[in-house]
Image (cartoon, rainbow, N blue to C red):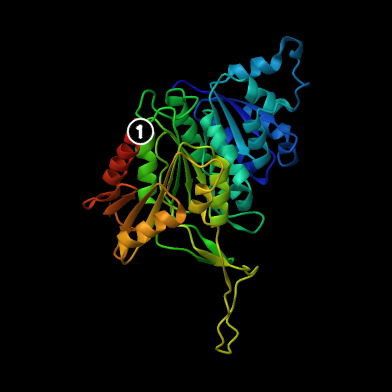
Amino acid sequence: MVAPRILLIVGGGIAAYKACELVRLIRKAGGSVRCVLTEGGAQFVTPMTLAALSEQEVHTSLWDLKNETEMGHIQLSREADLVVVCPATADLMARMAAGIADDLATTLLLATDKPVLAAPAMNVRMWLHPATQRNVAQLRADGVTVLDPDEGAMACGEYGPGRLPEPPFIWSAIEQRLAAAPAPPAPGVQGGALAGRHVLVTAGPTREPIDPVRYIANRSSGKQGFAIAGALAALGARVTLVAGPVELRTPERVQRIDVETAREMAAAVEAALPADIAVMVAAVADWRAASAAGQKIKKNGSGATPTLTLEENPDILAALASSPQRPRLLIGFAAETEHVVEHAIAKRQRKNADWIVANDVSGDVMSGDSNSVHIVTDAGVESWETLPKTDVAHRLAARIADEFA
């Protein structure tokens, strides 16, 4: 690879110190780096530090470019091979997604004609917030490469996704992005059977906190939902995947929004509307703790057990069915352990869904790689043989495409 020219925008977060190590790695690989330090970033690292490491002038203000009369910010945004935002804070990504240009960093990002890579870093709740997930989805749809944050302990004392990936990983992502073809402005395969259609898919479990270390969840792996999202994208659909906490690779050309709880999933689904098709595969927890404890619940030695009061979670499928923005085709899933078809028929009527895809999960179906499903529609019941989940996904995607032929 030819020595890359990187324009590095350093956002305002405690992880900004890792940008210094990233500069060192880029230089070590033979690349050049020009740094733009935001006002917030300057609270954590100094322009002198970045200038010494990059051996380049560091820019901090739209008005400190000597040739601004000649539109210096335009020139700066075009000289690099790649623009890297590290750390990309929640605020900075929100402004990027909205197209705001109120300082040097956001002006450069709006003016550049070069690919952009963002490495997020923020508090776990900020990362999981539906607003942040909407912004991430929008940036990815606009062609920005947004890395997934690492999971671990944070400076604020909380634990979860939101840590800045380590600099060697970011450098590897930079190499991959520079080697790749230019990212398309939006996902989807041109000319596919579902081209021009927006499909909303949910997948995986939800986790409902009991205290900081315990939660209510289920055995869903997310494999079937992710396979369906990928199969629909392969047919040209613009797919938004709202995913519970699973460790699965995002399918190609799919916009992924990560959530944890049922309420977060409901909010993300509502925010993703309108959609032509919705496939609600996620195994959403029916109940949550009415009041999650702020500290770990401990034994007191008396032998008494704590009382856990539950309350119902939102019914995402039923809410979609009654929404003014109801998708034209609404598909729910039913994970049953007995009377599978009978329960699915009743669920379709109760939820006002168009189709219900039912399966028997009394074995290892949820964590396994195969599935046997029944498709319940107003025309009756179709029972499919046991198939790999990927085959179920492609067959279901083709069945959906037939509805829009």
Q: Is residue 327 visible?
A: yes
Rendering coords of residue 358 (x, y %): 33, 55
- In the picture, measured across the screen, residue 169 lies left or right of residue 55, that is left
Point out the image quarter for the C terminus.
top left
Q: How many marks?
A: 1
- In the picture, measured across the screen, residue 339 lies left or right of residue 161, that is left
Point out the image quarter for the N terminus.
top left
Q: Where is residue 100, by image quadrant?
A: top right
Vertical comparison of 90 with 371: above or below: above
- In the picture, measured across the screen, residue 291 lies left or right of residue 330, that is right
Q: What residue type is labelled 1?
A: Ala
Q: Residue at x 35, y 36 (%)?
A: 403
Q: Residues within 10 Å of mark 1 (few under 14, many from 20)?
A: many
Vertical comparison of 330 with 109: above or below: below
Q: Residue furthest top?
A: 70
Rendering coords of residue 180 (x, y %): 42, 26
Q: Residue at x 40, y 54 (%)?
A: 348
Q: Name the residue under label 1.
A: 234
Q: Which residue lies furthest to the left in this view?
A: 385
Q: Residue at x 65, y 34 (%)?
A: 10
Between residue 197 and residue 228, name the one nearer to us.
197
| Secondary element at tag 1 | helix
Vertical comparison of 195 with 12: above or below: above
Rendering coords of residue 373 (x, y %): 28, 53
Between residue 170 and residue 53, name the one nearer to us.
170
Q: Residue furthest bottom?
A: 302
Rendering coords of residue 389 (x, y %): 29, 48
Q: Can residue 58 be seen in this view?
A: no
Between residue 277 and residue 125, name the one nearer to us.
277
